[in-house]
Image (cartoon, grey):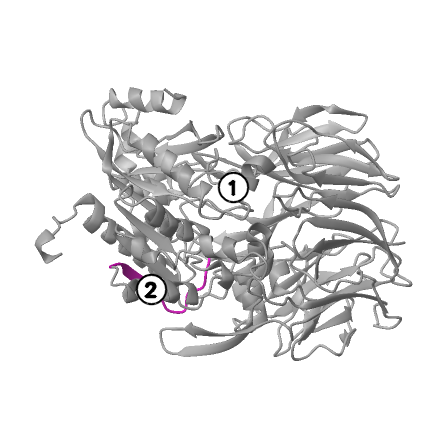
Amino acid sequence: MTSGTAAMAADLARSPQPAAATQAAQDAQQTLTLARVFGSPDLNGTAPRNLQISPDGRFVTVLRNRPEEKERFDLWAMDATTGEWRMLVDSKKVGSGAELSEAEKMQRERARIAGSRGIVAYDFAPDGQSILVPLDGDLFLATLDGQVRRLTETQAGELNPLVSPRGRFVSFVRDQNLFVQPLAGGVAQAVTTEGAGTVHFGEAEFVAQEEMHRSTGYWWSPDERYIAVERFDEAPVKVFSRAAIGATGTKVYDQRYPAAGTPNALVDLYVMKPDGSGRVKVDLGSDPDIYLARVDWLPDGSAMLVQRQTRDQKRLDMLRVDPATGKSTVLFTETAGERSWINLSDAYRVMKDGSLIWRSERDGFGHLYRWKAGKWTQLTKGPWVVQSLVGFDEAKGRLFFTGNKDDVLEQHLYALDLKRPGNVTRLTEKGWWNGATMDGAASRFLITRSSPTQPAQVYLADVTGKRIAWINENAIGPDHPYYPFAASHRETQFGTVKAADGSTLHWEMITPPLEPGKKYPVFFQHYGGPGTGQQVTRGWQGALPQYLVDQGWIFFQIDNRGSYNRGTAFENQIYHAMGTVEVEDQLAGANYLKTLPFVDPAKIATYGWSYGGYLSLKMLEKTPGVYAAAVAGAPVTDWGLYDTHYTERYLGDPRTDPQSYASSSVVTEASKIRDPLLLIHGMADDNVFLDNSTLFAAEMQRTATPFEMMFYPGNTHRCLFYTPGGPGASEHLWKTILSFLDRNVVAPKPQNTAAK
């Protein structure tokens, strides 16, 4: 019996009403509703974004959402000495409310902030005295005394705005060209002028934003002598006529979308002076069909470091580029195994002596190495994963990173000394999922943490991890939005089962108060895809799982083979085999559930969104009768419809490996589905096109295979538990899901066998 199972067995012997609940908590207790789960104020409490420490260390700045409008963010600052807070930019007072350009809407969708309003990003000037703030398609400069000055006022929106490294300029993309404007005042000058039609300068192409986690297409040198500028041409990219079907009409977009096996955008890199003169083209090699993965400058600005990834993502070259000539040389190369790929990372730093701190999976786990003059020194080691490189104190030789060294379900902040790399010190408290950022001087951290019982908190810490001050304590006290529901909050249990190959699979479960002899239905959630964060963690899950539990469901999820943060042997099992090991491991979870005395084995419903939606369909096709019903949200149904960088990484090129695509498709075996199915999709999805669901629905209808569907006008892709249509659409989505499950799982009607 696992520890989680033992705890639940003990729960069976307890009274359904928690005996420790105080009378005050009982008096304050309210019942969760879907309207309240998705309404304002946010039940997670305040949810600050984009936390930064000013360059001089005097201030902590955040984007803070409004209690009455949880998706609107304003810019706030805290004096690190006094702890005093003040709003720097009120998005409602300063903003115009103008509609965003289509280009900015698409960027926000790529960043998964499409539902956000107000301020979504900002950039400090190097002296720390002013902040560049994009708002409603224009740019503003805010000072720390609360003054705001407008920098631009145009019909066209400004994308990717930055303050230059020495603070003399502000740069941005407008109408597909890069502009530079004096920060002190003056007219913006076009650095490039050829951007038009299919040609873009200073932007990141679609797959860079969506799959490579690269959101910009230009990079200043530290001394402001040069700007490296990406040029991409979408002319070769296949055009899909995508209908964005809204409530009051339909817009048709001829969107260039690089589907698997089709041409990518042509990408070039140039170096030029801030006025656009002296342009030289960077030598990216003789093969034009590559990915421009990362671009960085050496600290002294003498050269660029450019990461070039092959189309099959099995090779990554680090190039050193002379900015005066564009000539490049290969410093080192990372290569993947025969049945593997290269995962891109931002966990690297360039040191003043020209050496690099570099994250690599060359030993089977993501670890840190030092590259110097062609030699490698491994800094971290073991059956665990480094997730991010937080900071580096080069003078003291101290390196700070996040990882899961202590527990695969927890993320912690760690420190190591370059002279004694084997001695790794944990700086954060066990029992939490932590993230961290650090100031440029490597003197302070901003640590964000949550646990199964505590929504996200943020605090300022010193280099030992000691808390200096709360930035957002967010404690669930009488003033917290979640407080009226805290008394009924149910504990999250954790445990493990074994996969067919002996791999350990981690699960989590939340149950209602268990009554002896009673069996409960299960809401079995999954994601299951590669290349993304794990789902089972000791972090805050939000109010929705608790709502489901309040409705009498057991909430359960398990991380299958193929998912991230467990090493390459665990992840690589999905190579050219989507829809195989994930289905097997989810089945292992279902079989485990059916052994529990309080689970109704005939009432296990499964749900997933995006890759999880795809997996819902595969699970019904491959394991009929196991699940009482399934919900598939925004699924990829034919991987030939999804983008190159993600899909070809795992399935290869369909032009040379069509079998991987044929076996992974859910369309060809749609008629095998015999269990109740609800299909959901946003009708303006520009990532997983609606074509995926209409293709699948047409095959179900052609073969007279029954199913239900709900499509959402005007809605895009987004993420689990949320739709960008606002609280009403989210509430409708979950009422639809639960109504479907009530009819097919909780209280299914007897089948009319005669009608068959």
Q: Which residue is mark 1?
A: 562
Q: Which residue is mark 2?
A: 699
Give residue 607's position: percent from left, percent from top. 35, 48
Q: Please indicate, yes or no, whether residue 425 appears anywhere in the rendered image.
A: yes
Q: Residue at x 73, y 49 (%)?
A: 316
Magenta-span inclusion, residue 715: yes
Residue kind at label 1, given as amino acid type:
Gly
In the image, is 42 to the left or to the right of 547? right
Dominant secondary structure, magenta: loop
Between marks 2 and 1, how big is the CA–CA gap?
Answer: 28 Å
Residue placed furthest toward the left: 754
Q: Magenta segment, which residues?
A: 706-718
**Crowd rating for badge 1 (residues with CA inside 10 Å; few <14, some 14–19, many 20+):** many
Front of the two marks 2 and 1: 2
Residue kind at label 2, given as amino acid type:
Glu
Give residue 393's position: percent from left, percent from top. 78, 36
